[in-house]
Image (cartoon, rainbow, N blue to C red):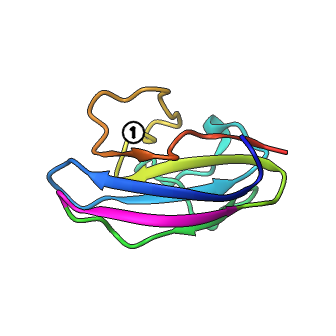
């Protein structure tokens, strides 16, 4: 993945509101701090919340540009979504957010 500004075009194909969060961290996804429900603690130790857009209503699309100019590893997480349980599946069949630019990756 190249460093720079990343454009995300995200469509909520689910039935409830969702949001897309982008974090930067050297932690493995399983090591991200989570609360008792398994949701990421957004201001937890070892992670930086890079982008937190508005909630996306069902059937709606959001376009967002995210700054990925700093070297490191970035992780996108939908909430609510498949992160629960301390892992991020590489493919989630029922993921309600679809779009371009949604793959996690290393910059730099």
Q: Residue at x 39, y 39 (%)?
A: 82
User: Viewer-proximal residue, 5 or 90?
Assistant: 5
Residue 63 located within the stretch drawn in magenta = yes
Density class for disc 1 (Cα within 10 Å; few <14, some 14-19, many ≥20) is many
The furthest residue to the left? 15
Residue wearing tag 1 = 82
Where does the magenta region start and end?
58-67
Residue located 46% across and 36% down the image = 85
Q: Which residue sits at x=50%, y=55%?
A: 35
**Spot occupied by residue 90 in the image (x, y as percentages of width and height):** 50, 27
Q: Is residue 36 visible?
A: no
Residue 52 vertical placement versus 80 (above, below): below
Question: What x and y, as percent, mark residue 43?
Answer: 63, 68
Q: Position of residue 61 (x, y in %)?
A: 29, 61
Which residue is outermost to the bottom?
54
Q: Give the secondary structure at mark 1.
A: loop
């Amino acid at each position: 993945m190249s460093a720079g500004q990343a454009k995300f075009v995200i469509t909520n194909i689910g039935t409830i509101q969702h949001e897309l969060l982008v974090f930067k961290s050297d932690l493995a996804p399983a090591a991200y701090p989570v609360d008792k429900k398994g949701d990421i603690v957004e201001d937890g130790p070892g992670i930086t919340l890079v982008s937190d857009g508005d909630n996306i209503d069902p059937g709606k699309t959001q376009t967002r540009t995210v700054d990925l100019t700093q070297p490191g590893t970035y992780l996108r997480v939908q909430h609510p979504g498949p992160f629960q349980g301390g892992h991020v599946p590489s493919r989630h069949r029922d993921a309600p957010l679809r779009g371009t630019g949604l793959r996690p990756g290393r910059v730099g």
